[in-house]
Amino acid sequence: MPPAAAVRWPFIWRAPVAPVAVLRAGVRRSGMRRCLSARAGSGGHRPPAYGGLLLDAGGTLLQVARPVAETYASIGRRYGSDDITFLALAVPLSCAFHQTYAVFQVPNVRPSTGVTKPEKRIMEGFKRAFAAPWPKTLRYQDDGRPFWRIVVAEATGCTDDDYFEEVYQHYAHGDAWRLPVGADTTLHELKDAGGDKPFYLLLFSVRGLHFSSVKLAVVSNFDTRLRKLLKDLNVSDMFDAIVVSSEVGFEKPAPEIFKIALDQIGMEASKAVHVGDDETADKAGANAVGLECWLWGEDVKTFSDIRDRILTTDQQ
């Protein structure tokens, strides 16, 4: 700006060099700077270690709010009383002049079809039902009721239709589920990694520190309740793709379901990672299409672990 113009407009503020340098130095010493440096490297452009994250739902992203056996048993108590009716029984009594009858009411007890198993045996039956081979192509077709009806009956020994429906509807609502600790924060951090930066991050961009957002997808063997559950838990909008087996006609470990997810987020298998809790469905299935897989509970135990492994390029 010419000196004359500066005189005419004395309130135009021009940022001095020193404050910016001070800001940069202050943030450099802060924990934020150390975190960003870990993610971006010590200099130059370093994107996240993976451009895409695929997540299994049940058992990984979605955890039951309380143990399955406890839920099955507590709901089953309302269906657990014996059905008692009384039969009128006429017993002939003979006398010298005529035959008479004495009428008695005899209780007729029909065994309960409710849940009487202890929780330990319920869980054993639940696991046994899941391990059994399924004769059809998909376990979860549409709403998954045929499969879940067998699971609930095998686990509890109860075939009451009303009982099954109450259990099924219980797990159709978000309050029956929870997200692992830190999941919401991690998803936001990965999703926002390449978004608009506040002023203090622009200071690092000047020095060549740039970040790219991570594409997020759910890849799950689940029925049609899944999308509602993700909405109930306020994470649905974070995902670039939600691939549900009952909708696409393929279940993990089939390679097709992983390929559909990768296509929807526009990512090559070599640049993405999958996280799931099943050795066969998740790990073997992902590896078969060239996807690295981290087993939930073994390779990664928290969502902070996932975040650090994705955003820290120099993994020791």
Image (tube, rainbow, N blue to C red):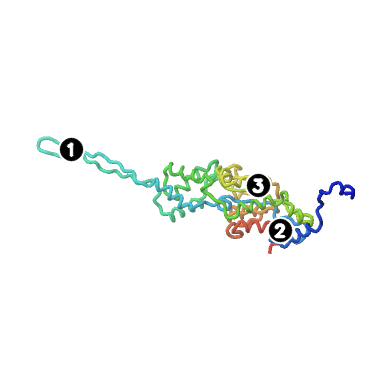
Percent from the top left, x then y, of residue 264?
67, 45
The amino acid sitting under disc 1 is: Tyr
In the picture, residue 16 is in which quadrant? bottom right
How many marks overall?
3
Q: Residue at x 23, y 40 (%)?
A: 89
- Which is nearer the eye, 49 or 210? 210
Closer to us: mark 2 or mark 3? 2
The amino acid sitting under disc 3 is: Ala
Element on which disc 1 rests: strand
Q: Which residue is mark 3?
A: 261
Percent from the top left, x then y, of residue 176?
51, 48
Label 2, label 1: how many angstroms apart (C-alpha)? 94 Å
Q: Which mark is residue 205?
A: none
The answer to whether the residues at label 2 and label 1 have Cβ atoms under 8 Å apart is no
Label 2, label 3: how many angstroms apart (C-alpha)? 29 Å
Element on which disc 2 rests: helix
- Which is nearer the eye, 109 or 257? 109
Earlier in the chain: of badge 2 and badge 1, it is 2
Earlier in the chain: of badge 3 and badge 1, it is 1
Q: In the image, is residue 101 above or below residue 50? A: above
Residue 52 visible in this rendered orientation of the protein: yes
Q: Which residue is mark 1?
A: 101
Q: Is residue 197 left or right of residue 77?
A: right
Q: Which residue is mark 2?
A: 36
Earlier in the chain: of badge 2 and badge 3, it is 2
